[in-house]
Amino acid sequence: MILGLTIPQFTALHVALSFIGIATGLIALPAYAVGRWMPRMTAVFLVTTLATTLTGFLFPIGNFTPALGVGIISSAFLAIALVALYGYGLNGRSRIIYIITATISLYLNMFVLIVQAFLKVETLNNLAPNGNEPPFVVAQTVLLLAAICLGWKATRRRLAV
């Protein structure tokens, strides 16, 4: 049991937090890229993405895994994003630091979503059973390019609060 939940219940909570983080990030960050600030959506994105990362550390861990590595990296970027937003109020360079770290945080959450989809969805797993076949590589490449474009556009746009 984890936090009073069975492993399947805790996994469902972790996945729900992840989906909420991804959904709100896919609303808040593109809005930011076109100059719209959505403070509540941004807060939900950051809180649920952080909760996803932190709950990931509560699963039974026998040794270091790629998932653990992604969690550590994601935690660092989320901490920087939170300081840039709430500590520095997006003033000066903190605006660019925030958008880059928030975009990376969304990217990492979606990266894990794609990995899990190819592991757990039978049709996708049949296309890329080892996780290094072209369909998996294409999906991850498209995600990476989209994140880079979103981040680039957001750093170039002035915010209309």
Image (cartoon, rainbow, N blue to C red):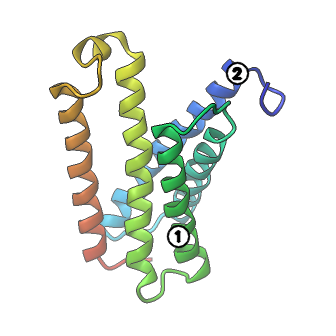
Q: Residue at x 55, y 49 (%)?
A: 49
Q: Position of residue 17 (x, y in %)?
A: 59, 39
Query: From the viewer's perspective, is 93 left or right of 68?
Result: left
Label 1 is placed on what type of residue?
Answer: Ile
Disc 2 marks a residue whose amino acid type is: Ile
Q: Is residue 115 above or below residue 40?
A: above
Q: What is the secondary structure assignment of the residue under circle 1?
A: helix
Q: Is residue 1 left or right of residue 35?
A: right
Taking depth in this image into account, of 102 and 74 the one nearest to the observer is 74
Q: Residue at x 29, y 11 (%)?
A: 123
Q: Position of residue 134 (x, y in %)?
A: 15, 27
Mark 1, residue position? 80
Q: Quadrant of the N terminus?
A: top right
Q: Nearer the viewer, residue 132 or 148?
A: 132
Left or right placement of residue 2 versus residue 88 in this view: right
Q: Quadrant of residue 15?
A: top right
Residue placed under numbered mark 2 in the picture:
7
Q: Residues within 10 Å of mark 1 (few under 14, many from 20)?
A: some
Q: Nearer the viewer, residue 139 or 59?
A: 59
